[in-house]
Image (cartoon, helix red, strand yellow):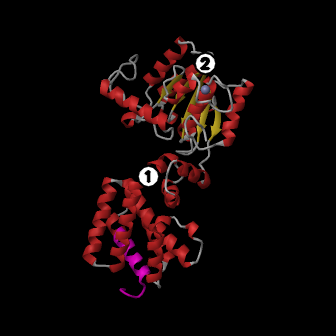
Amino acid sequence: MNQLYNLVNQENNRKLLLNTIRNGHIANAYLFHGPEGSGQEGFALEYAAMLNCHAREDQPCGECPSCHKMKTLEHGNIHLVFPIQTGHIAKDDPPFKNFGPDDMEEVQNCIKKKAANPYEKLCPFDGKHIPINFIREIRKKIYLTAPESGYKVVIVFDADLMLEPAANAFLKILEEPPEKTTLILTTSNLNALLPTIRSRCQTLYFPALSTTELGNHLRKNGIREDQINLVIRLSGGDVRQAIQLKEADLGRLRKITLETLRMVATWKIDKVYDLVNQFVMLRKENPDEFDRLMFSISFWFRDAAILKAGKPESELVHADMQTELRKFVDYYTELDAFGAYSAVDNCIDLTSRNVYINLALVNMFFKIHNRIQPGKSQ
Ligand SMILES: [Zn+2]
């Protein structure tokens, strides 16, 4: 575990980066890429801290004045570039020209959040691209200022969001890189970057985290043991999403999952239509929660199949609903758990493709009902 940023290990990349410092082979430009939440942004910060740490050990010491400033991302040697909405500005204006004091405070808050959790996205006001003015401003800064000591590091988060003029301005920096400066681009969308940029950077791939690595990280961050499997599944291996799935959300998810199953098992047609409407509403208002709910229901039947097959309980996703699951499986002796699981899976596929949602849901509930109590209501 790293002291400075609480990153999940990416041992090979960490060693590789450490060796560049030991051998003095620090590239002018790096491209850190990998799936969302695999840590490429956090490791860009860590590399910047390593390059500037006074102790020069295997990882940033966390104690020296440089590390203290890096911890809060207030180090004079690091320059962060991220997507923002500039509003209307002229060619030579600074990128934040239209930002009032409140807006700037929000930007600072986003930077603070990034410092506290490097898996958090740095994207104030939901910016959609990195404007050329931002690159120009950074360019001025790095040519004008000498490093405090150590290395100047420019980190461009979500570099694929540089439009072509911004990307070309960036290339200009690479043509004449200032001394003791390194530029790090990060992206989870490698193919969206211009080939001219890709070819000039040393590329480092950050693979998705294994479930074991993610599980250990969640444990250290206080996620309950019986919720770890569920959080891993729901987050799809993305550390940021996993950390965001707070216990309260999971409690609510559990409640709705159980209510849905009860409603579908008893099958009162007006109640089922109410339920469909609730699902449709949820999808409209909170698509992420809708997705989580659908997956939660599909995991329920996957878990029921595991219990029916007499497999170990450690394989359960809904480990925190073990008692309810056991009762369910014991009560509905004819349950076709795999059939119900497939019905939910099929519906997840249909709703993600935006087919007629109400119909897809009614169909799913009906199929589940018939697979819970086969032969009773057909
Ligand atoms: Zn240090």
Q: Which residue bears the numbered disc 2?
A: 177
Looking at the rendering, the quadrant in which ligand 1 lies is top right
Any magenta on residue 376?
yes
State the image quarter where residue 332 is shown. Answer: bottom left
x, y (%) of residue 71? 52, 30
Q: Residues within 10 Å of mark 1 (few under 14, many from 20)?
A: some
Which is the main secondary structure of the residues drawn in magenta? helix
Q: Residue furthest bottom?
A: 375
- Which residue is nearer to you in this view: 311 or 26? 311
- Which residue is nearer to you in this view: 291 or 2? 2
- Give left or right: position of 237 versus 248: right
Q: Residue furthest right?
A: 23
* SS at badge 2: loop
Q: Residues within 10 Å of mark 2 (few under 14, many from 20)?
A: some
Quadrant where the C terminus sits is bottom left
Q: Which residue bears the numbered disc 1?
A: 245
Quick check: 174 above or below 190? above
Q: Is residue 353 visible?
A: no
In the image, which disc is placed on residue 27? Answer: none
